[in-house]
């Protein structure tokens, strides 16, 4: 979830980034504790903090799922490889705050993560505070198997993670745009007015020492190339890759046209919703 419930791990896994068994992680498989696996440095995928989560305050009050939630809908679109969420919160001083989000891990660019938010209200004006910082406050408690160093420069927040044995380095570099204007910090203060939706885009570039000699420089270089226009183009290219994927993944029922039509009718939606 974009606004995770208390206790939610909400972690991110990266292909190829493994380490030894971390006994402190609550969801690690117990079978990996067996004696014949204890010395292997490539036993399980390393969990990283969820880079899409954020905190939101409206007129100073924290917005969360435990209070004032009127409506929630979550849609996984497998045709285009995107997860959308929609929230509606009742505000203490009348009115509602609506939040829509869409996010994807690019199939066209394996180093790119994107998130798009739209906020709206039916009330006069609301003072919003958003914190998109990549390192969550409880980082050291929930991710004792990682070390992290953060820096911010030229509108890019960079977090350098280091795993335990075998010691992979992974860098996340993030940028944000409010409308078409670049934000200088992951902590935003903006005003939201009735009938004037606010659009926020977040781009995250991820590189590791598995594919780059200098993942930190590569992530910053990759993030620096982003623009609002390229953000929109990235989803179009990503969706096109998913179209090609499903074209190759289709099934054929030779000599059984009715069976093939029934299969297509059931598979075409490729969209799952939770309310």
Image (cartoon, grey):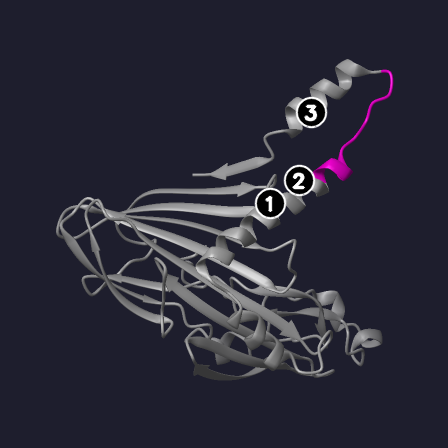
Q: Distance from label 3 to label 2 (Cα)?
A: 15 Å
Dot 1 falls on a residue whose secondary structure is helix
**Chief secondary structure of the magenta span?**
loop
Q: Quadrant of the C terminus?
A: top left
Nearest to N terminus: mark 3 or mark 1: 1
Name the residue furthest right. Answer: 255
Q: How many C-alpha atoms fall within 10 Å of the one at disc 2: few (<14), some, or many (≥20)?
A: some
Q: Nearer the viewer, mark 3 or mark 2?
A: 2
Q: How many C-alpha atoms fall within 10 Å of the one at disc 3: few (<14), some, or many (≥20)?
A: some
What residue is drawn where x is 71% and y is 41%? 244
Residue nearer the viewer, 89 or 235: 235
What number is the disc on residue 264? 3
Residue interval drawn in magenta = 246-255
Residue 139 position within the rendered picture, expressed as x and y whole percent measured from the top left:
48, 77
Residue nearer the viewer, 111 or 256: 111
Q: Nearer the viewer, mark 3 or mark 1?
A: 1
Q: Distance from label 3 to label 1 (Cα)?
A: 19 Å
User: Which residue was labeled with disc 1?
Assistant: 239
């Amino acid at each position: 979830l974009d606004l995770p419930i208390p206790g939610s791990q909400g972690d991110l896994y990266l292909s190829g980034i493994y380490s030894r068994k971390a006994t402190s992680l609550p969801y690690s498989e117990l079978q990996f504790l067996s004696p014949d696996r204890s010395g292997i440095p490539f036993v399980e995928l390393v969990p990283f903090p969820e880079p899409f989560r954020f905190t939101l305050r409206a007129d100073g009050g924290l917005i969360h799922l435990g209070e004032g939630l009127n409506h929630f809908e979550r849609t996984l679109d497998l045709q285009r490889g995107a997860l959308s969420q929609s929230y509606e919160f009742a505000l203490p001083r009348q009115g509602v705050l609506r939040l829509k989000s869409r996010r994807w891990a690019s199939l066209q660019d394996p180093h790119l993560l994107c998130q798009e938010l739209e906020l709206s209200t039916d009330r006069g004006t609301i003072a919003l505070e958003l914190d998109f910082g990549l390192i969550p406050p409880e980082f050291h408690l929930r991710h004792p198997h990682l070390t992290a160093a953060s820096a911010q420069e030229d509108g890019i927040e960079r977090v350098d993670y280091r795993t335990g044995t075998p010691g992979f380095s992974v860098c996340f570099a993030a940028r944000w745009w409010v409308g078409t204007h670049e934000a200088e910090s992951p902590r935003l203060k903006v005003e939201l007015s009735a009938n004037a939706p606010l659009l926020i885009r977040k781009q995250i570039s991820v590189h590791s020492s598995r594919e780059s000699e200098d993942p930190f420089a590569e992530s910053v270089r990759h993030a620096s190339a982003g623009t609002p226009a390229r953000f929109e183009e990235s989803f179009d290219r990503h969706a096109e890759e998913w179209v090609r994927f499903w074209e190759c993944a289709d099934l054929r029922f030779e000599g059984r046209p009715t069976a093939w039509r029934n299969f297509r009718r059931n598979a075409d939606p490729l969209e799952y919703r939770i309310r």
